[in-house]
Amino acid sequence: MKKILIPDPPVPALEVRDVTKNYGEVQALAGITLSIPRGELFGLLGPNGAGKSTLINIVTGLVRRSSGEVKVFGFDVERDYRASRSLVGAVPQELVYDHFFTVRQTLKIQSGYYGLTRNDVWMEELLERLKLKEHEHQTIRELSGGMKRRLLVAKAMVHRPAILILDEPTAGVDVALRRSLWDLVRQVHAEGTTVVLTTHYLDEAEELCERVGIIDHGVFVALDRKERLMQQIHNRRVTLDFGAKVEGLPEELARLGGTLSEDGLRATLLVDRSDGSLQRLVEALGRGNLPLMDFQVAGAGLEDVFLELTADSAKPDERRPAAEALR
Amino acid sequence: MSFPEVPSLLPVPFRTLLYREVHRFFIVINQTLLAPVISALLYLFIFGFSLGDRFGSFHGYNYLLFLVPGLVMMGLVNNSFQNPSSSLMISKFEGNIVDILMAPIGHGEIILGYMLGGMFRGLLVGTCILVVSCLFAIPPFSHPFYLVAVALLSSGLFSLLGIVAGIWAEKFDDLAMFPTFIITPLTYLGGVFYSISILPPLWRTVSLLNPLLYMINALRFGFLGVSDVNPGWSLAALAILDAALFGICLTMLRTGYRLRK
């Protein structure tokens, strides 16, 4: 197979422009635009049925777009499908495998599909990295769920793709495997591979991704660097621990929405840091009327961003257009 | 496992798919190779030996010899059909069809990979049936080149039909319609066990609408030099049907029919 030469920058790794997808009368994507520069670790989030997998599948060629343009390193995924597909490796959401073959045969066949006949050195490395070496002569039916998941990752990487797409790679795997997959993703990314990760685990995106897109009802409701998204959630959760039982909260704290625990030893408040509430809280505490022993302030996580932006997901007409919601 | 590492003009993805298709049916050889040969042996035993004398001769050949080309064709078309159709259906069912659909393989390469895999199985089964039959009766191989051409075109045609069926079918029940309602009736009514010369005129005319009749008689012409229909027309029709089905398969893949949403 002819070697695909990746065009020089500034051609992005993935460019999606005004892409729509309709399944009959159902609109899965309603005009998605996205550009992922080479070398980025991008997180694609969204509730079930939001359109994440549809977008991923359009990039990998499993789904045909209704309109718009999708390019991988400048190659259109339909017109130049051979070039674009040779640059993409994808780990599907489902555990799909061919039970006729062993682990090694599977990787050998997958290499062949990508035009590689002499790929043994890299295959060995993948088997080692993904802890599959000792199972290489087992048929896939004999593997545990975690091993099957690792094999899917190995298959996706067997041709050293320039973009690795992981569609919920850690769904249903144990904590240890999840951590080892995270390490692998970081390693692959550090080696220069562009990574697109869809996940339901928001801590996963928070831990790994540089930039995040939140998709809902087929449009981006947020698309920005992870830190900026989290900064724009104004609420802070404040927890106050008291050294002795408190009978009731002072009026200022009650006005700030504070609630006292049943045992009277803890109060929690959700404080908006943009309207001076935090300042008023500190002033109230400074008056010394409460036996304060400890306090914690929790910043917004990606989960807060996600929940705030997708809270109206049942009401499509009220959805916010791409990226405007937080600006 | 190793692919042929010799320098080749054939694209690696195509060779890989072909290898997979052939390797896959060798893994379940009892079901894919031995079962049809045993079935053919039973037909030879029951119809050739036990009942053959009662049927007399057809076109100057004893019934056993008359039967052999039909049985070879039956094994050939059934297995050529089953290899790609079951492979595609299982891949769709298990989800691993995405391996092919996401890979940089051309549409023509995909078709040829599945088609040649099916042809290989069909021709192997047909050859095994022929070899076993030769233990009982050796046909004269009257037109060997014609025979090879008919075998190739027939196995190609049914491999292509297997691809169409494998793509079209959404469940195993859909796929079972083809052998149950199409291939088996057309084969049995296509002159495997008899010459249409013994049929009443009406049924003889109706039989001429059955494409399997032409294929079976064409193979019989290659083996024995006799046929109920014009062998030249049969070969031409086969070639045209092959080309037409290849075009249909290509269209299905290009449009992503039932493969890409």
Image: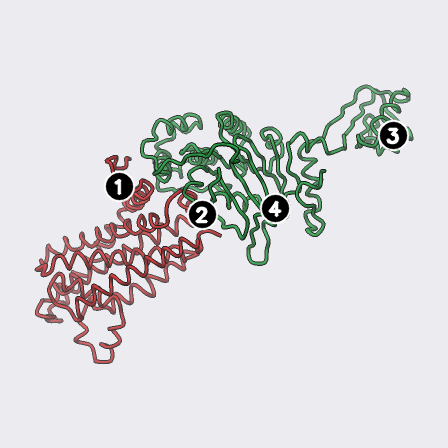
Chain colours: A green, B red
Helix, strand or loop at label 2? It is loop
- Chain on which label 2 sits: A
Q: Is residue B256 left or right of residue B44?
A: right
Give the residue number, with chain letter if any, for mark 1: B9
Task: Say which amino acid is labelled 1.
Answer: Leu
Residue B72 tag number: none
Which residue lies at the image location 28% right of the left edge and 49% below the top edge?
Answer: B117
Q: Quadrant of the N terminus of chain A?
A: top left
Circles 3 and 2: CB atoms closer than 8 Å: no
Disc on the earlier residue, 3 or 4: 4
Give the residue number, with chain letter if any, for mark 4: A50
Check the image and report above or below for B172 versus A178. Answer: below
Query: What residue occupies the far bottom of the structure in this picture?
Result: B201
**Circle 3 or circle 4, nearest the eye:** 4
Disc on the earlier residue, 2 or 4: 4
Q: Is residue A20 left or right of residue A275?
A: left
Residue B142 vs residue B249, the one in the foreground? B249
Q: Are marks 4 and 1 on the same chain?
A: no
Task: Say which amino acid is labelled 3.
Answer: Leu
Circles 2 and 4: CB atoms closer than 8 Å: no
Disc on the earlier residue, 3 or 2: 2
Check the image and report above or below for B23 versus B160. Answer: above
Check the image and report above or below for B39 versus A270. Answer: below
Give the residue number, with chain letter if any, for mark 2: A79
Helix, strand or loop at label 1? It is loop
Residue A321 placed where, x, y %? 68, 45
Task: Say which amino acid is labelled 4.
Answer: Ala
Give the residue number, with chain letter if any, for mark 3: A253
Give the Cα distance between marks 4 and 1.
45 Å
